[in-house]
């Protein structure tokens, strides 16, 4: 038995521990700070692949700052709404109301006037709600995927996961074929 087979057999006999749930930071400050920093990194990375990078060498800094400001404002408003409403973190309405407030604030700060604030607030509310909904669905799918023991492939699929009996049968067949080929090479060398 090869060392990989021994490890597999040892793992198979061990009791399976329940999967740990996906854990998010508990304090609102950590949630806002981590999201803001992540948005800044994404903005800087997006600017590094931008075509304007050569003409404006400080464009990654500008993109990173803008992404961080927008994410910080949106996440801060969402957390404020969550605390004010005393609702759960997964409530999509928090994202909608937080998007309305942060969009209106950023629209006014940009000097777009009342119509710009309205437009920004609708865009932020729609994007925030869509991203929160997609995030909650993706989290549920990931947790569901983590709870599965193995992947079930259709019978017609060319790659199959073999059980111990089929694996032993396949190894015996491979050794037989290897012996036949080796014996055939020896016979050719002798002649």
Image (cartoon, rainbow, N blue to C red):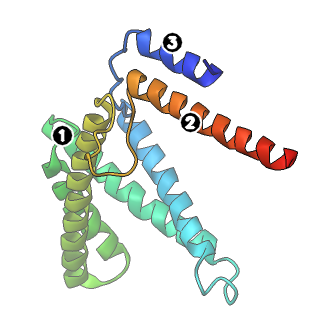
Q: Residue at x 13, y 51 (%)?
A: 93
Element assignment for label 1: helix
Q: Residues within 10 Å of mark 1 (few under 14, many from 20)?
A: few
Residue 166 lies, in percent from the top left, at: 40, 28
Q: Residue at x 79, y 49 (%)?
A: 188
Q: Quadrant of the N terminus?
A: top right
Element assignment for label 3: helix
Q: Nearer the viewer, mark 1 or mark 3?
A: 3
Residue labelled with disc 1: 84
Q: Is residue 46 above or below residue 4?
A: below
Q: Nearer the viewer, mark 2 or mark 3?
A: 2
Q: Quadrant of residue 103?
A: bottom left
Is the C-beta separation of discs 1 and 3 under 8 Å?
Answer: no
Of the residues under marks 1 and 3, which one precedes in the sequence? 3
Residue labelled with disc 3: 10
* Front in this rendered view, residue 122 or 101: 122
Q: Is residue 175 above or below residue 39?
A: above
Q: Nearer the viewer, mark 1 or mark 2?
A: 2
* Front in this rendered view, residue 148 or 110: 148
For the residues labelled 2 and 3, the Cα–Cα distance comes to: 24 Å
- Relative to 155, is 68 on the left or the right? right
For the residues labelled 1 and 2, the Cα–Cα distance comes to: 67 Å
Residue 108 lies, in percent from the top left, at: 30, 75
* Front in this rendered view, residue 40 or 140: 140
Q: Residues within 10 Å of mark 2 (few under 14, many from 20)?
A: few
Residue labelled with disc 2: 174
Of the residues under marks 2 and 3, which one precedes in the sequence? 3
Residue 76 lies, in percent from the top left, at: 34, 50
């Amino acid at each position: 038995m090869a060392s990989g087979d021994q490890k597999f057999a040892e793992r198979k006999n061990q009791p399976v521990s329940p999967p740990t749930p996906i854990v998010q930071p508990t304090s609102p400050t950590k949630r806002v700070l981590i999201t803001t920093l992540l948005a800044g990194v994404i903005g800087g990375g997006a600017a590094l692949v931008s075509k304007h990078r050569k003409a404006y060498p400080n464009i990654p800094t500008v993109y990173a700052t803008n992404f961080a400001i927008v994410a910080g404002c949106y996440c801060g408003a969402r957390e404020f709404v969550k605390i004010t409403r005393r609702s759960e973190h997964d409530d999509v309405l928090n994202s909608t109301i937080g998007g309305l407030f942060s969009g209106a604030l950023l629209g006014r700060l940009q000097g777009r006037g009342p119509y710009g604030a309205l437009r920004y607030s609708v865009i932020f509310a729609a994007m925030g709600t869509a991203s929160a909904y997609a995030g909650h669905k993706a989290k549920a799918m990931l947790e569901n995927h983590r709870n599965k023991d193995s992947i079930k492939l259709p019978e017609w699929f060319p790659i199959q996961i073999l059980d111990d009996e089929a694996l032993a049968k396949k190894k015996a067949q491979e050794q037989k074929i290897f012996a036949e080929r080796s014996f055939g090479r020896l016979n050719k060398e002798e002649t």
